[in-house]
Image (cartoon, helix red, strand yellow):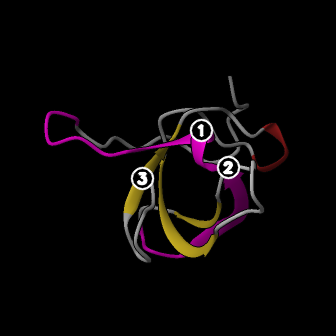
């Protein structure tokens, strides 16, 4: 699936290096189509509750998913270990 720039997505996987958990929201800031036979990837920016960027990561298409209208966002304290 190709996500447009600035689309909000959800992480399918935790990223321990950045203390991010699966299910956290991120914003697409760059798209890389990949070579033939490779899945596309995206650079994502993750923000805190005040709108400040806390991480920039690049993930494959299979590692993210679109946000759904039947989902609610929630907050957690930064620094909690990713699970």
Position of 77 compared to 54: left or right? left
Position of 60 compared to 10: left or right? right
Badge number at residue 62: 1
- Estimate how packed mark 2 is, as few (under 14), some (14 to 19) or many (20 or more) residues with alpha carbons within 10 Å: few
| Residue nearest the observer in this picture, 33 or 77 | 33
Residue drawn at (73%, 63%), measured in percent from left and top? Answer: 34
Q: Is residue 16 above or below residue 26?
A: above
Badge number at residue 82: none
Does label 2 or label 3 sit earlier along the sequence? 3
Residue 79 placed where, x, y %?
A: 70, 44
Residue 14 placed where, x, y %?
A: 68, 33
Position of 46 compared to 43: left or right? left
Position of 21 compared to 73: left or right? right
Q: Which residue is mark 2?
A: 39
**SS category of the residue bearing label 2:** loop
Q: Are marks 2 and 1 in contact (CB under 8 Å)?
A: yes
Q: Is residue 51 magenta?
A: yes
Q: Which residues are magenta?
A: 50-71
Q: Looking at the rendering, which quadrant does residue 15 occupy?
A: top right
Residue 22 placed where, x, y %?
A: 56, 32
Q: Which residue is mark 3?
A: 9
Residue 27 placed where, x, y %?
A: 47, 66
* C-alpha gap between disc 2 and disc 3: 17 Å
**SS category of the residue bearing label 1:** helix
Does label 3 or label 1 sit earlier along the sequence? 3
Residue drawn at (50%, 62%), measured in percent from left and top? Answer: 48
Q: Is residue 3 above or below residue 9?
A: below
Q: Is residue 11 magenta?
A: no
């Amino acid at each position: 699936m190709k996500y447009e720039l600035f689309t909000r997505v959800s992480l399918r996987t935790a990223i321990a290096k950045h203390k991010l958990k699966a299910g956290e929201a991120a914003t697409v800031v760059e798209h890389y189509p990949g070579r033939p036979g490779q899945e596309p990837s995206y650079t994502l920016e993750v923000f805190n509750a005040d709108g400040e960027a806390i991480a920039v990561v690049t993930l494959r298409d299979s590692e993210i998913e679109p946000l759904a209208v039947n989902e609610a966002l929630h907050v957690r304290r930064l620094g909690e270990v990713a699970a």
